[in-house]
Image: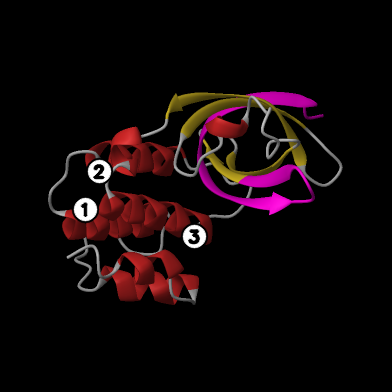
Amino acid sequence: MTPRRYSDEGIVLARRSYSEADRIISILTKSHGRIVVLAKGVRKLTSRKRGHLEVFSQIKFQASRGKSLDILTEVETVNNFGEIRMDLKRTALAYFFMEVIGRTTHEGEPHRELYSHILENLRLLKSERKLRTLKNNFIVEVLTSLGFWPRGKVLPNPQAVLESVTERQISSARVGKKLIT
């Protein structure tokens, strides 16, 4: 039997509004893989959780199992990567990273290596000058760690292979394409 409450560390991949004051949050966690939780009342101006649930923020959280969605009960920011948010190109690339992870992983499948990899790339993104190289290396690492591409084999066009795996174009890539040269 699984415990009713659990806590973990994760990176916020995406969020969307739900009802009047709630949000549905997608999180890549260290131990539980990608999960989707409901953050009740987080859109209210008085919510203490509000600032902690920004996309590509690293958080520690507690959640309770619910009937359809787990309920986020507590959250604390570990790193909000503020340096990245100050630069439009870096922000676009960070959103691209989050979308790639969201599209290539399934709920409930733990990927500790992938979690570590995305954290490392977010840290590199703070100071890296060659953003296109960082983006391509990220795609290659994601595809190899998830088993879509053999490790050690050269990947000539990472973006095309990624789009064939996801069977759609990554929308944040279109936005950031002009920025990342």
Give, as a three-letter code, the residue at label 3. Thr
Q: Which residue is mark 2?
A: 125
Q: Residue furthest right?
A: 67
Q: Which residue is mark 1?
A: 134
User: In front: mark 1 or mark 3?
Assistant: 1
User: In front: mark 2 or mark 3?
Assistant: 2
Disc 3 residue crowd, few under 14, some 14–19, many 20+, Cα 10 Å? some
| 20 or 143: nearer the viewer | 20
In the rendered structure, which disc, 1 or 3, sits on the residue that comes first in sequence?
3
In the rendered image, which quarter is residue 60 located in? top right
In the rendered structure, which disc, 2 or 1, sits on the residue that comes first in sequence?
2
Q: Which residue is mark 3?
A: 104
SS for callout 3: helix
SS for callout 2: helix
* Residue 31 visible here: no
**In the drawing, does residue 73 fall left or right of residue 130?**
right
Name the quadrant of the C terminus.
bottom left
Residue under the image location 71 percent in, 36 percent down: 44
SS for callout 1: helix
In the rendered image, which quarter is residue 118 located in? top left
User: What segment is highlighted magenta in the picture?
Assistant: 1-25
**In the drawing, does residue 142 fall left or right of residue 40?**
left
* Residue 180 visible here: yes
Residue under the image location 44 percent in, 71 percent down: 165
| 130 or 149: nearer the viewer | 130
| Cα–Cα span, label 2 and label 3 | 21 Å
- Residue 113 spot, x, y in % from top left: 40, 40
